[in-house]
Amino acid sequence: MEALSLGEKGAGAAAAAQPFGGRRRRGDIVIEEPRTRPAHIQDKKGSTGHPVPLVTNFFRVSSTPSWALYQYNVSFAPEIDYRGVRFSMVKEHIELIGETYAFDGMILFLPKRLEQKETVLFSKRRNDDADIKITITLTNELPPTSPTCIQLYNILFRKALHEIGMQQIGRNNYNPDMAAYVPQHK
């Protein structure tokens, strides 16, 4: 990912000299895609040897070409100390925010923009029926290549891997049901 870069229109000859394979424009931003093979190579298929069957844990991610992720700050008045209560209060308004969202207790990510830049909602606290004012404020519109989006993708992938029973050991995920035991190494 560190090979991806964003530049402004007309970045000039310095940008052209960089090892990037292609360019796409999004408004005033030029998104440069990294070159994954030397310029003289047309494909990555070898010319000698024999085919080998391979298996990989590859996830294809396809998306709509022009989409954005919207980041919102969520505040509660009076303040709610418990994350679980904040989660349930936001979930009460699923008809407004939609079923697809990511919320960590303070920051809300949505694939759609809410009608107002600042949306005020109300919920009742269950233990004393007090009215809680929930203010959802748009703070950022993130393109798919944003570091914040990439961090969110990683969180979602880790959660999906956990849901299918994979276990993380170090930086890798493994299926414990398919473990290969090596007796001499215990």
Image (tube, rainbow, N blue to C red):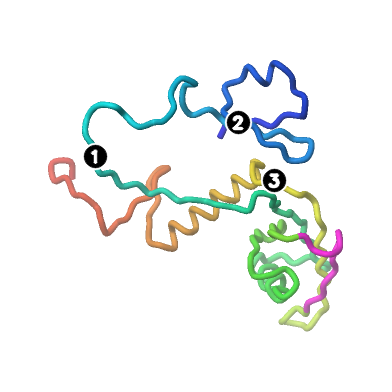
Position above or below: 80 against 63? below
**Type of the residue with mark 1:** Val
Residue 13 image point, x, y percent = 70, 16
Which dot marks residue 22? 2
The part of the chain drawn in magenta is 113-123
Q: Residue 111 magenta-drawn?
A: no
Mark 3 or mark 1: whose residue is earlier in sequence: 1
Circle 2/circle 1 CB separation < 8 Å: no
Q: Nearer the viewer, mark 3 or mark 1?
A: 1
Mark 2 or mark 1: whose residue is earlier in sequence: 2
Within 10 Å of disc 2 (Cα), the crowding (few <14, some 14-19, many 20+) is few
Which dot marks residue 179? none
Q: Which residue is mark 3?
A: 143
Position above or below: 111 against 153? below
What's the residue at 71%, 33% (across, down)? 30
Q: Nearer the viewer, residue 64 or 146?
A: 64
Mark 2 or mark 3: whose residue is earlier in sequence: 2
Within 10 Å of disc 1 (Cα), the crowding (few <14, some 14-19, many 20+) is few
Residue 156 image point, x, y percent = 54, 55
Count how many numbered circles sit on residues in the image: 3
Q: Quadrant of residue 77?
A: bottom right
Q: Which residue is mark 1?
A: 52
Distance, label 3 to label 1, CA atoms, is 38 Å
Residue 88 image point, x, y percent = 67, 73
Distance, label 2 to label 1, CA atoms, is 31 Å
**Type of the residue with mark 3:** Pro
Task: Identify the secondary structure beneath mark 2.
Answer: strand
Q: Quadrant of residue 184?
A: top left
Left or right placement of residue 35 versus residue 121 in this view: left
Residue 105 image point, x, y percent = 68, 61
